[in-house]
Amino acid sequence: MNNKEQDNYSNATLDLIKKFVDSNQRKRIGLLTQIESEFENIYKLGPKLFEIFDRNGDDWSAGWLLQVLKKYKPDFFEDSEFNNWFNTYSDIDINYEEMQLMLVEQKFEEADRLTSSYLRKLAGKLAEKRGYVFYSEVKNMSGKDLQTIDRLWTIYSRGRFGFSIQAKILKSVGKRYELMWPKIGWKKEGSWTRYPGSFIWSLDAPEGHMPLVNQLRGVRLMDSILRHPAISDRHNNIL
């Protein structure tokens, strides 16, 4: 392939990516397979491709491009900053690099376990010692950290996972948890989905399927998280 042909391929790939980024959710979904098939040309565009994205934002198109490169061209990540390309923030010095890496690699079960550990850490020493969070502890959790966790889940799930997505779904069913559980795949035919083996740890899972929140002590913990101002304000999903 000569230089002119290569430039034509690069320009065509850039045009496709621009179309992908500028599209709404429905149209983006329709372009996923085409984007994935272009992994070789995306790789050739190199790191400059990501200059169009806001590292403080939550544009899942960038997350998907990173996941495609991680799957097909792992040597792109020799520059390790792309394992943690999106900026993360914490009020209590939690390092979210491992969680972001798990999400880039689509290791969703591992990312979910990390999320649970971060929630315990955000709840305080007593929660870490007992191994679970009381709903009454949620109101004092750092909003900055909750938004970081939620952003990462949204970025690396094509905008389909995260607490704010669960809040959107709850709002759409009239704030009735009994209607939300089957929609997000946590209940089927009246029975709770068995953890961990029966959960779907992939992008094929229902919208809102992750992250998990233990329901053994009722809905109060989940409700407190979804009603936390840092979550409910994220996409104007105030409950």
Image: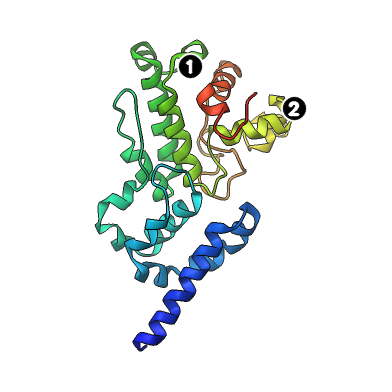
Q: Judging from the image, what secondary structure is the residue with disc 1 in? A: helix
Q: Residue at x 48, y 16 (%)?
A: 138
Image quadrant containing the C terminus:
top right
Q: Is residue 138 above or below residue 202?
A: above
Circle 2 residue: 174
User: For residue 138, which numbered disc appears in the image?
Assistant: 1
Q: Residue 122 in the image: state x and y as whole percent.
A: 39, 20
Q: Is residue 69 left or right of residue 36?
A: left
Q: Is residue 222 above or below residue 86?
A: above
Q: Is residue 236 above or below residue 16?
A: above
The colour scheme of the drawn protein is rainbow
Q: CA separation, marks 1 and 2?
A: 23 Å
Instruction: Name which quarter of the figure residue 219 lies in.
Output: top right
- Residue type at tag 1: Val
Mark 1 in CB contact with mark 2 (< 8 angstroms):
no
Q: Residue at x 46, y 38 (%)?
A: 151
